[in-house]
């Protein structure tokens, strides 16, 4: 059974204070690891897909990295508008997405 | 390009009733997946439809069912509602041709069971 664990559950940062979110996973045959952002009352918004260990992707202040056991979402100099819940999901041999419970990020001005 | 749309956005039902939720995927997308999101369990996969056929199914009771139409629009039905069915129900669409196609989510339907 595929499993995804995200840490920390919640993170409070000051504006400009860089940090990283962790996503640890076990999966039978990783086909892809996905990062989403979810704002309150809305559906998840796609951020990145990573396919193999060593891969990295960037978008504005966000950078996602992947190893064989975990992924990190690095947030550089965050702004209050980066406040959201960040979800990690893996897709394995069963071809369905298994999600972690997310990290709730709050960035204070 | 219009995103995934879900109707209705909010529903209040009582125990024992049934409910039907609707999802219209992004134009050109042929796969639709449904998820249940609760504070305790997070996002859990319900089922996936591709070309009107159920391709995958999660670990939910038979009270939860779905279907997909020829235009790729999808509906899910929950019969004999229980209090524990209160959740945000999310629909996601993807191109469907490859197993790693990105899934794009709709805004969800908030179901409250009283």
Image (spheres, helix red, strand yellow):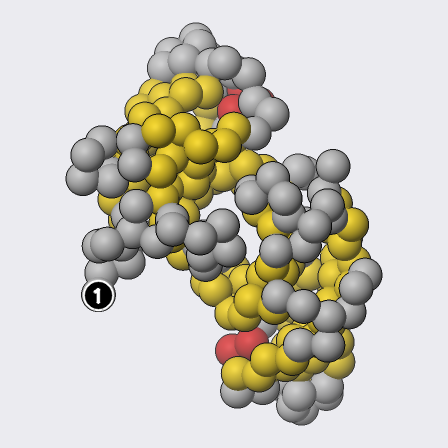
Relative to A92, does residue B82 appear above or below in the rendering?
Answer: above
Chain under numbered label 1: B
> Residue A89, percent across and down?
62, 54
Residue B8 seen anywhere in this rendered image of the structure: no
Would residue A53 be found to the left or right of residue B3 on screen? right
Within 10 Å of the Cα at label 1, are there few (<14), some (14-19), or many (20+) other Cα atoms?
few
Residue B12 horizontal side relative to residue A98, left or right: left
Residue B105: where, in percent of width, then height?
41, 53
- The quarter of the picture where the N terminus of chain B appears is bottom left
The residue nearer to you, when weighing A95 against B5, is A95
Q: How many marks?
A: 1
Residue B92 visible? The answer is yes
Describe residue A22's horizontal placement relative to residue B32 as left or right. Answer: right
Q: Residue at x 64, y 48 (%)?
A: A92
Q: Residue furthest left?
A: B71
**Where does residue B104 sit, x and y in percent of width and height?**
40, 56
Residue placed most toward the observer, B82 or B92: B92
Query: A50 and B109: which one is in front?
Result: A50
Decide: is B54 above or below B26: above
A62 relative to B90, above or below: below
Which picture quadrant has residue A83?
Answer: bottom right
Kindly indicate the quadrant of the structure image that contains residue B33: top left
Query: What residue is shown at x 25% (from left), y 44% (from top)?
Result: B24
Give how far across and how far down residue A25 sits, in percent.
Answer: 76, 54
Relative to residue A63, is residue A71 depicted above or below?
above
Q: Secondary structure at mark 1?
A: loop
Q: Which residue in the protein does label 1 denote?
A: B1
Residue B75 placement: quadrant: top left
Q: Residue at x 30, y 36 (%)?
A: B51
């Amino acid at each position: 059974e595929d499993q995804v664990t995200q840490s920390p559950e919640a993170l409070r940062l000051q504006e400009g204070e860089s940090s990283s979110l962790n996503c640890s996973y076990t999966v039978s045959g990783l086909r892809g690891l996905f990062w989403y952002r979810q704002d309150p009352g809305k559906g998840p918004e796609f951020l990145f897909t990573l396919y193999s260990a060593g891969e990295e992707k960037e978008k504005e202040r966000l950078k996602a990295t992947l190893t064989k056991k975990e992924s990190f979402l690095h947030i550089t100099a965050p702004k209050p508008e980066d406040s959201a819940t960040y979800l990690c999901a893996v897709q394995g041999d069963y071809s369905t997405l298994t999600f972690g419970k997310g990290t709730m990020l709050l960035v204070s001005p | 390009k219009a995103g995934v749309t879900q109707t209705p956005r909010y529903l209040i039902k009582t125990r024992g009733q049934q409910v039907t939720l609707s999802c219209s995927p992004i134009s050109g997308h042929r796969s639709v997946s449904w998820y249940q999101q609760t504070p305790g369990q997070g996002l859990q996969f319900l089922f996936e439809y591709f070309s009107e056929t159920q391709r995958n199914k999660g670990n939910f009771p038979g009270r939860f069912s779905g279907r997909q139409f020829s235009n790729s629009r999808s509906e899910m039905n929950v019969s004999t509602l229980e209090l524990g069915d209160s959740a945000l129900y999310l629909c996601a669409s993807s191109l469907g041709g490859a197993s790693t196609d990105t899934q794009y989510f709709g805004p969800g339907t908030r179901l409250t069971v009283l």
